[in-house]
Image (cartoon, rainbow, N blue to C red):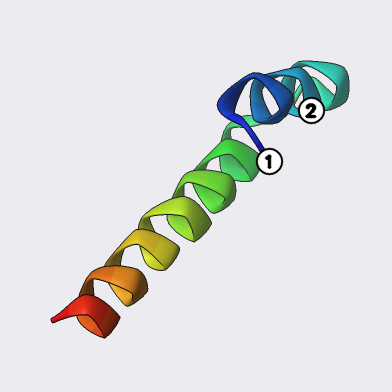
Amino acid sequence: MTRDELNRELRMHSATFPAVLIVYGMIIGTMVLSAMAIV
């Protein structure tokens, strides 16, 4: 999923603030997990 697709999804759902936080949390979580996997 590209960033453009993600932005479109968020706009379509007109995400509320908590939903945005959850999405960003998921993105950061996957980044941390992949970084740990690399290290």
Residue 32 drawn above or below residue 39 = above
Name the amino acid type tagged 1: Met
Q: Secondary structure at mark 2?
A: helix
Q: Residues within 10 Å of mark 2 (few under 14, many from 20)?
A: few
* Numbered label attached to residue 9: 2
The nearer-to-camera label among 1 and 2 is 1
Name the amino acid type tagged 2: Glu
Q: Which residue position holds label 1?
A: 1
Instruction: Measure the alpha-carbon separation of dots 1 and 2.
Output: 10 Å
- As drawn, the residue found furthest toward the front would be 38
Judge from the rendering whether residue 30 lies leftward or rightward of residue 6; answer left or right. Answer: left
Q: Residues within 10 Å of mark 1 (few under 14, many from 20)?
A: few
Q: Residue at x 40, y 65 (%)?
A: 29
Quadrant assignment for the N terminus: top right
Q: Nearer the viewer, residue 35 or 19?
A: 35
Residue 38, x across and y down, in percent: 22, 77
Residue 15 drawn above or below residue 36 = above
